[in-house]
Image: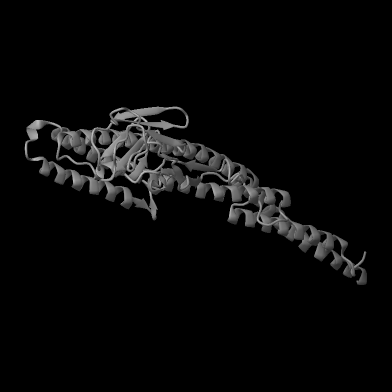
Amino acid sequence: MRINTNVSALNTQRILGQTDASAAKAIGRLSSGYRINNASDDAAGLAIANKLNSNVVGMQQAQRNISQATSMLQIADGATQTISGILDRMKELAAQGASSNIGTESGKLQNEWDSLSSELSRIVDGTDYQGTKVLTALGTGLSVDASALGGDGIASVSVSGPASAQAYTFANTATDGNAVTLTAADGTSETINVTVDGAQTLQFSGLGVTVQTNSNFTRSNGTDTAGSLDTDAFTPSASGAAASFLVGSTGDYTGNDKIDVNIGALSSTYDALSTASLSSISGAQSALTAIDTAVDATNTFIGKLGAAESRLDYASQNLASTLQNTQAAESTIKDADMAQQMTEFSRLQILQQAGTAMLAQANQAPQQVLQLFR
């Protein structure tokens, strides 16, 4: 029998210490809800869970990006609906002006037409979301520098709808000079009838090209006379960039994690309307043609807008599913099973109580040596 070294007490103390440490860990898990509270609990599991959590944070922001992008497109959608209503009214005015029954009241039609045309420009230039002009900056557009054309009879050239960034060439070779043909590099062409010189709107609706001439414009019969369009050529240049929205967090941030929305721009679509004149039947007829082109371009824009909204909706649904499953995967690694941990904690409490009692008994054992001194 030894009193300097109480092996039973030391052994009981060691086991009780282990039980206390396990109980402390169980308390930590129960209080935090996590199975892994520090790297020593499960180093590999913590690394995997942290990576999953990083993806979750990225996807949550991507989900918000989609919601905000949808709001942006819906603002543009609402504006185009208003524009469609204005175009309907302008077509009504032009149709009224194209009939002789209007008499001398065309000035009233012109006043409303000009007012509505100004409102179109205001809506196009003023509709924005967080500083982004949603009708002009959600994709690449096409523009033409009229000063680069050979003739001095051209005030402006605008393109929309089916127009593309290819070369276009004018020809005015009819004997009477009334026929003007515009031919694209891909071989498509369109011929319109021009009966007067001077300022007017020439609408090549099939090609999506509108030419506004000035007072210097002169028809040609096959010779490139001053002010004519004959042999003049232009190539629309792209401007702007597609709107880009981050909708994922897989690491492919320049590829599958983003959606590019290229709707185009309405900025030049209505240029021909601002110069239209309803003072004559022929002018009102030209205005009707310009309105039809503007309506087609607007409907094309609306179609692209709706397609983009639909795509973002599906992207949101897919991202929501991915986000949910990624969070579930992280939970299986990092979260604590509370029922299991509570059961473990109850077991450790009993062991603590039993260990404490046994340590007391072990400390009492050396006192039996005193019996030897009696």
Q: Pinpoint residue 135: horizontal percent, then vertical percent.
A: 36, 46
Q: Nearer the viewer, residue 10 or 89?
A: 89
Q: Residue at x 40, y 39 (%)?
A: 232
Q: Position of residue 233 (x, y in %)?
A: 42, 39
Residue at point 32%, 43% (across, down): 227
Q: Is residue 295 shown left or right of residue 114? A: right
Height in image: 233 above or below 374?
above
**Percent position (x, y) of residue 265?**
38, 43
User: Relative to 192, does residue 113 appear above or below in the rendering?
Assistant: below
Q: Is residue 166 left or right of residue 191?
A: right
- Looking at the picture, the colour scheme in use is one colour
Above or below, 54 relative to 191? below
The answer to whether any part of residue 307 appears in the image is no
Residue 13 in sight here: yes
Relative horizontal placement of residue 217, taking residue 19 as reference (left or right): left
Q: Quadrant of the C terminus?
A: bottom right
Tell which residue pokes out farthest to the bottom in this image.
Answer: 373
Residue 37 location (% of width, % of height): 65, 56
| Towards the viewer: 168 or 95 | 168
Residue ID at (76%, 60%): 17
